[in-house]
Image (tube, rainbow, N blue to C red):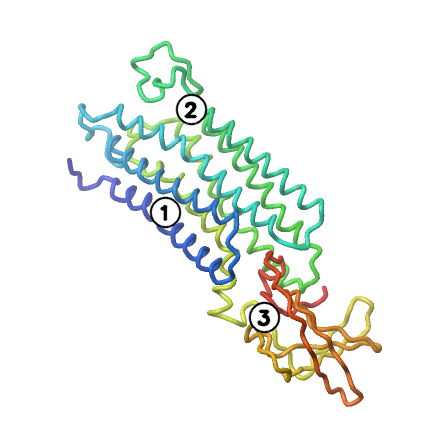
Amino acid sequence: MDSSDNLQPQAIGLIFAFPCFASVAVALRLYSRMLTKSFAADDWVICVAMILYWAETFTSYKVIIYTYIGYNVWEIPTDHPAILGSKYTYATELIYNPILALVKTSILLFLLRLTGQKKSVRLAIWGLLILNGIAAIITFFLAVFRCVPVAANWDLISYPNAKCLNFADFVTGTGSISILTDILALTLPTWIVYHLQMQWNQKLMLIGILSLGLLTVVAGIVRLILLDKFDRHMPENYTYSVLFCVSTIEVGLSFVAACAPSFKPLVTRLVPKLFGSTRTGPYNGSTNRSGRTRLGYKLEETSNFTSRTQDQAATAVGASDGELSHGPTKSKDKNIITLTTQMEVTWDRASCEEQQTSSTESLVYGRGGNRHSK
């Protein structure tokens, strides 16, 4: 059946566009992890969530086709497969919440990997992981047994005595739980970054990178308001709408938000100066917490070993009131520095394995980046 003004093509376009965007985000994330050799549990979780997202895309497509979403009600044939469409709707409901829970789990596992955190922060992350898991399990079983017997979920007419939760209350309740855990997860990046020693503009940049989940919160709130209004005051021409696609938009944005922090190695390759450079000039003055002036010197590499990256070809040495400190690096490699009266510097390096864990500052500076006091 064809109609010149139906919205079904737009609905189909939306449910495939956002999974494609999410797939690109996940692919870039995996490529970034391959470059840094830091593939971990959070990446496995996001991959599982991506598989489920495409499964939900398939069921959503079937819902659109079999329930004639985008068509006017009077254009729907009387013999359309309503029960089959309801089965796919039920499957979509079952998959939706676990996807968001897995994406959130991936974000929390990533935050857990960041080094230099206080014990209280790590405990908060673990607590939120447990809360998120419990909420996901409860929500899943509420979706499974929203109607008893279960078959009433897709064929209510055949089970007139079935007991079902109010659909609007179910959607609003489960959506509110998801938004609550999203908001709790958003508070963690600010807590983690607040005490880091870095310039405020870079601190705000890092908070922004880690808080891109705000996109998911906004999308979740918009989805909740629109669906609650639609379910409680369903219009007569209820199929002539693309509101069904708002859920897949929310899920797609959550993937982008979860993967964005991992893009840093890719961005620094394309725009090296965006996150600052590890090289210092011949003189680089800064003031430490005690108020004493620190003098920076540009030291070219003169030893017989090869630097690990191009960014480490020049290193800053600071001197204040008779003390020396080697420029900050994200490596366990030790440097022995000797200072002569002519300020001639030589060094040797003891070989040591590179630290494999993630660093919070590395999201802004990378390995061997510059760092300044607040």
Mark earlier in primary sequence (3, 2): 2
Of the residues shown, which amino acid type is indicated by label 1?
Pro
The residue sitting at 77% across, 90% down in the picture is: 342
| Residue that label 1 marks | 19
Q: Nearer the viewer, residue 304 or 246?
A: 304
The label number, if any, that marks residue 144 in the structure image = 2
124 over 266 or under it: above or below: above
Of the residues shown, which amino acid type is indicated by label 2?
Val
The alpha-carbon separation of the residues under discs 2 and 1 comes to 24 Å
> Residue furthest toward the top?
161
The label number, if any, that marks residue 135 in the structure image = none
The alpha-carbon separation of the residues under discs 3 and 1 comes to 33 Å
Q: Residues within 10 Å of mark 1 (few under 14, many from 20)?
A: many
The alpha-carbon separation of the residues under discs 3 and 2 comes to 50 Å
Which part of the image, by quadrant, shows the C terminus? bottom right
| Residue that label 3 marks | 276
